[in-house]
Each structure stands twice: as structure tokens, then as C-alpha cells.
Amino acid sequence: MVSEGRPPQPHWCDAWVDTDYEAGLRLLLGHLAESGARRIGLSLPLHDDAYPRLNAQAYRAWCDEHGMPALVEEYAPLPDPFTAEQDAVSRLLDHD
């Protein structure tokens, strides 16, 4: 079986289709900054896959390099992922 999403601690027999999260996120953040964004937030699920950690690392590194504040809100995807993510985004919007 092959899945999308890298396990946090892969084993020799694991197989997955990977994504270059850092490159993709850096392109997105650069585009947003070039378009005038000055407070770019990141909402992340608390998840057992590696992608939230990889995205958070790339985001924080980019923010440090560009002198921008790192605004991160995490949320538990269960039992209601839609409400939980909306609440996380609301917290981001409430940042001063």
C-alpha cells in the first residue's frame, strides 16, 4: 500500500507519495508578501502525519528570514474538523 503523507517516524517498509512542503509553502508565502500581506498566519491540525510539523518548520523559518511574525494556531481535527479549523482561523484574526 502507498499513501500520501509521510509518517512522522517512517519504517523501512513504509511507502508514500511525498510533497515538497517547504518549497510549496515558500512559494505561497513569497507570493502573499509580494502582494502586500504583512501578517500571514498558519492554521495547522494536530495530526500524526509529518506534514503539520514540516509546514510549521518551513513557515517559521520563512518568517524569521523575512522579519515577519510567526502566527500559528493549532486545532484538534476531531470530533469536528470544520468548526475546529474555523476557530483556529478566528484566533489568528484576533492576533494584534
Image (cartoon, rainbow, N blue to C red):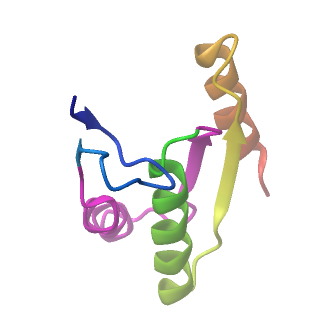
In percent of the image, x 49 and y 67: which residue is there?
Answer: 59
Q: Which residues are magenta?
A: 18-47
Q: Hey, which residue is sitting farthest top in the picture?
A: 79
Q: Position of residue 80 (x, y in %)?
A: 66, 11
Q: Position of residue 29 (x, y in %)?
A: 37, 64
Above or below, comparing residue 56 to residue 84 in the picture: below
| The N terminus lies in quadrant | top left
17 horizontally vs 80: left or right: left
Above or below, comparing residue 33 to residue 71 in the picture: below
30 horizontally vs 65: left or right: left
75 horizontally vs 66: left or right: right
Q: Quadrant of residue 92?
A: top right
Q: Position of residue 63 (x, y in %)?
A: 53, 76
Q: Position of residue 51 (x, y in %)?
A: 44, 50
In percent of the image, x 57 and y 40: which residue is there?
Answer: 48
In percent of the image, x 48 and y 51: which residue is there?
Answer: 50
Viewer-side residue, 34 vs 53? 53
In percent of the image, x 79 and y 58: which residue is there?
Answer: 96
Above or below, comparing residue 79 to residue 22 in the picture: above
